[in-house]
C-alpha cells in the first residue's frame, strides 16, 4: 500500500498548520519519535488544509498509473452518448422540473 495523502513531507513542503492532536491516541508516541516531535504535545494535520488544486493534482498523480486511458476514453464517450439521448428524449430541463 502506498500512502498518498497526507505525508509528513507534504506537511513540511506546504507548511500546513498543525492542530491539537488526540491526547489518547496510542500511535502518537511512535509518530512523535519518528518525526522528532514533542511526545507531550500531540498534533495532527488535516488534508483539508491543502490547496484544493494541489490536493487534486496529488490524487490524480497517484492514480494515473492505474488508469487504462482507452477504457476511460470509452466510458467518457458512452456518458456523452447517454447525456445526448436524455437531452433529446427529455428536453433541456431535468425531469423533476418539467411541467405536466
Image (cartoon, rainbow, N blue to C red):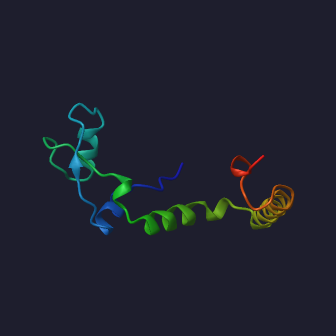
The percent position of residue 99, horizontal first and vertical second, equals 74, 49
The percent position of residue 34, horizontal first and vertical second, equals 27, 49
| Above-or-below relation of 53 to 66 | below
For the point 50% across and 64% down, which residue is it? 56
For the point 28% across and 32% down, which residue is it? 26
For the point 82% across and 55% down, which residue is it? 90
Figure quadrant of residue 40: top left
The percent position of residue 21, horizontal first and vertical second, equals 23, 42
The percent position of residue 3, horizontal first and vertical second, equals 47, 53
Horizontally, residue 65 falls left or right of residue 35, namely: right
| Above-or-below relation of 67 to 27 | below
Horizontally, residue 79 falls left or right of residue 38, namely: right
Name the foreground residue: 85 vs 26.
Answer: 85
| Above-or-below relation of 71 to 43 | below
Number of labels in the image equals 0
Instruction: Give the farthest residue toward the front.
Output: 100
Name the foreground residue: 11 vs 74.
Answer: 74
Horizontally, residue 68 falls left or right of residue 36, namely: right
Figure quadrant of residue 86: bottom right
Name the foreground residue: 9 vs 68.
Answer: 68
Amino acid at each position: 500500500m502506498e500512502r498518498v495523502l497526507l505525508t509528513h513531507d507534504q506537511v513540511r513542503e506546504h507548511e500546513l498548520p498543525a492542530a491539537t492532536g488526540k491526547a489518547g491516541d496510542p500511535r502518537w508516541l511512535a509518530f512523535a519519535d519518528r518525526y522528532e516531535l514533542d511526545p507531550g504535545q500531540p498534533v495532527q494535520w488535516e488534508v483539508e488544509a491543502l490547496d484544493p488544486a494541489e490536493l487534486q493534482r496529488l490524487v490524480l498523480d497517484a492514480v494515473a498509473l492505474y488508469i487504462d486511458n482507452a477504457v476511460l476514453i470509452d466510458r467518457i464517450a458512452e456518458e456523452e452518448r447517454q447525456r445526448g439521448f436524455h437531452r433529446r428524449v427529455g428536453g433541456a430541463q431535468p425531469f423533476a422540473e418539467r411541467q405536466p
